[in-house]
Image (spheres, coloured by chain):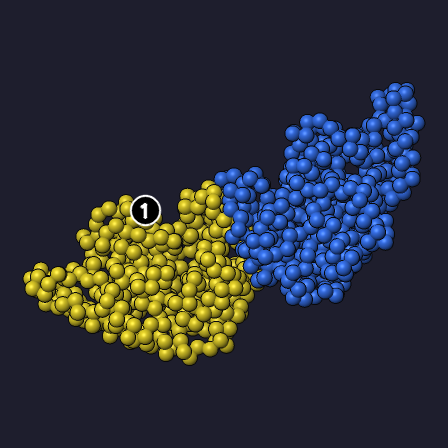
Chain colours: A blue, B yellow
Amino acid sequence: MAEQDIIIHPEEDIVDPWTVKSSSDKGVDYNKLIEKFGSMKIDEELIKRMERVTGKPVHHFIRRGIFFSHREMHHILDLYEKKQPFYLYTGRGPSSDAMHLGHLVPFICTRWLQETFDVPLVIQLTDDEKFLWKDLTAEETHKLAYENAKDIIACGFDLDKTFIFSDFDYVGGCTDFYKNICRIQKLVTFNQVKGIFGFDDSTCIGKVGFPAIQAAPSFSSSFPLIFGGHTKVPCLIPCAIDQDPYFRMTRDVAPRLQFLKPALLHSVFFPALQGAQSKMSSSEPTSSIFLTDSQKDIKDKINKYAYSGGQATVEEHKEKGGDCEVDVSYQYLRFFMDDDAKLEQLRKDYTSGELLTGHLKKELITVLQKLVGEHQERKAKITDADVKKFMTPRKLNYKY
Amino acid sequence: MAEQDIIIHPEEDIVDPWTVKSSSDKGVDYNKLIEKFGSMKIDEELIKRMERVTGKPVHHFIRRGIFFSHREMHHILDLYEKKQPFYLYTGRGPSSDAMHLGHLVPFICTRWLQETFDVPLVIQLTDDEKFLWKDLTAEETHKLAYENAKDIIACGFDLDKTFIFSDFDYVGGCTDFYKNICRIQKLVTFNQVKGIFGFDDSTCIGKVGFPAIQAAPSFSSSFPLIFGGHTKVPCLIPCAIDQDPYFRMTRDVAPRLQFLKPALLHSVFFPALQGAQSKMSSSEPTSSIFLTDSQKDIKDKINKYAYSGGQATVEEHKEKGGDCEVDVSYQYLRFFMDDDAKLEQLRKDYTSGELLTGHLKKELITVLQKLVGEHQERKAKITDADVKKFMTPRKLNYKY
């Protein structure tokens, strides 16, 4: 999204780990968010440096500003240049077995980072969080963690270098992890989580303590077995920007524990089919394309729900052109169409009015049917035994 | 303590898990406390029933009103009569390696209960709590848990039927325990713990969540291995009355989780050497007789610090007599002198003025030197391997 396209009413955007709402049909004002959160924009200089250091082009998520903000990514590149270790940490809240396209975004980026930098990765499944926040039992969210792990593994992570864990398993399975949680919880007051997360007196005490559980995997000392006893390995967290409050808190407590502050890469939200005012959400099925949707589902949903940036009539469209900034089909193609040249041609032709919405939707349907179809094929091959392997605490294969 | 002896300013007593302060030199008004906390007095009828059901006299702690209050002890006796199972749960906060006489009280009672009812027992060492509340590292309190375990084992628990655990180990070692903690934390709001425990906005989020960790061992489903998968075994908790707020909260949430409410036996506080206005505290060494004190230490401390209920001069004492209700030596003898007849004789002779404070102190010194000396002998024989046995999660030997 070009800088000049970012506009209006930024004060009305609501962005926290539970709510993303924008009053603009172009979605959240991300530049304002960078300012508010105090992070750094991923600029041309950083992108060029990443390409220079790794010797390969950056993922199109980074090139196209889908990952748009960071904290201390230059430090991570310094480490990589000096052949010093770091690890990746990302996660998911398993509130449903129906993962959707938006959920893939951090995992696709994380997979690319793991492949590019050849580093270990821990993936937290916050079944405890979803139990606390949703009307689900502990058994249900615990089971969903294992369900979701299959979708995550289907993204292509390296078993040798990846540990996936459910919080119920791992808090209840590792004293060092629980100790780090307590260490963080000792340094954060109710007043602070009230300010950061909007908790109040009626919030249950489980929620009050939870931010420490999402913070703790940022510190390699939480994983003595996984990292072979290396307790000071720096951490890079790719995540959607709504998760940043957790990691601002984490970065605040880290030095007081003599721990390293994690670095971050932030993505934009994945828009709902209805448009960028809200993000895609499993709890609103018509807003979402699920990873379990059939080829026909995908076609029908795009055709029926994908918000169009086109004009009311063909004549008007040909005359005035379409608006890519609000057109959901175009926005989705930015996420999932690899081919830069083709995407740019579509943008030009849609903007000029030469291409109609129907054409853009057709392109998107083809891309998504392939993406989801291939995901389903990979997922079908993943057995419970594979999940067990990824989720068994063990030393990852990496030289420190 | 006879009922008519309980007096004045009860509204100024402060009793919560961190503070016990009374404005009266006779200590906390326990009858008022029963009223305030909504528990039941351990009356003659209950004592007689216990003796009838078990076929043996109750421990002198119960006979003498040191354990003075209960919740649903009749229900526990019903179970015992019907040969139905229950288990005991008690604990300690390992804030110091110097355990004192007061710390022995719940363990002596618990040991008697285990022996009398022949039931399993879990003992929680809240090293996480002490880390959160004190200026100690997690490593220090974790280590203290193991130190304290030796003193606890020296009280004579049955290895076959006793599981001792550190929270750092067991929260970080048992998913079912952590799940129960989350279940409790989901049902308790910040507002509630504010009311029950006096937390405020500046309280760290670890403390805010902790009450659930002390609550969780009240439910046998927190110990699937220990109780061989029996998830509905009723629980009896012997503890000092200041711990009751935790278990009022526990009893409140239990039915909403379809768990059983724990029964309770409450003890009075063990008074400081300086008198019953405050309880014995490790953090004030001159208030305490430690389990590590030498025979000479015991003698010197009693002679130097034990608050006397005697009169200013021998003449006056002989004329007016001593006051057993405030005399610390007499009060300690009530805890630790087995012989009822001898204790009664001492009380009469001291009250009439026939016996001087020095005599009472001498009697007490003899009793405590024996008690502490024998404890030290037993403790000296306990090896790290013994501690490990008690602290290894395993199925306890008990028929359900």
- Badge 1 crowding class, 10 Å Cα cut-off, few under 14, some 14 to 19, many 20 or more, is few
Please say whether residue B183 is visible from this viewpoint: no
Q: Secondary structure at mark 1?
A: helix
Spot occupied by residue B135 in the image (x, y as percentages of width and height): 46, 57
Q: Nearer the viewer, residue B89 or A174?
A: A174
User: B123 left or right of A254?
Assistant: left
- Where residue B71 sits: x, y (%)? 36, 54
Three-letter amino acid code of the residue under disc 1 = Lys
Position of the N terminus of chain B by quadrant: bottom left
Q: Circle 1 is placed at which residue position?
A: B36
- Which residue sits at x=49%, y=64%? B140
What chain is tagged by disc 1?
Answer: B
The relative height of residue A306 versus residue B63 in the rendered view (above or below) is above
Front residue (pair B95, A157): B95
Q: How many labels, in total? A: 1
At 73% from the left and 28% from the top, the residue drawn is: A7
Residue B30, placed above or below residue B229: above
User: Up-down: is B273 above or below A207?
Assistant: below
The quadrant holding residue B348 is: bottom left
Task: Tell me: B154 left or right of B369.
Answer: right
Of residues B177 and B211, the one nearer the viewer is: B211
State the residue at coordinates (65%, 29%).
A12
The percent coordinates of residue A352 (x first, y second) are 90, 26
Q: Where in the figure is residue A313, as x and y percent of width and height?
A: 87, 21
Q: Is residue B249 visible?
A: yes
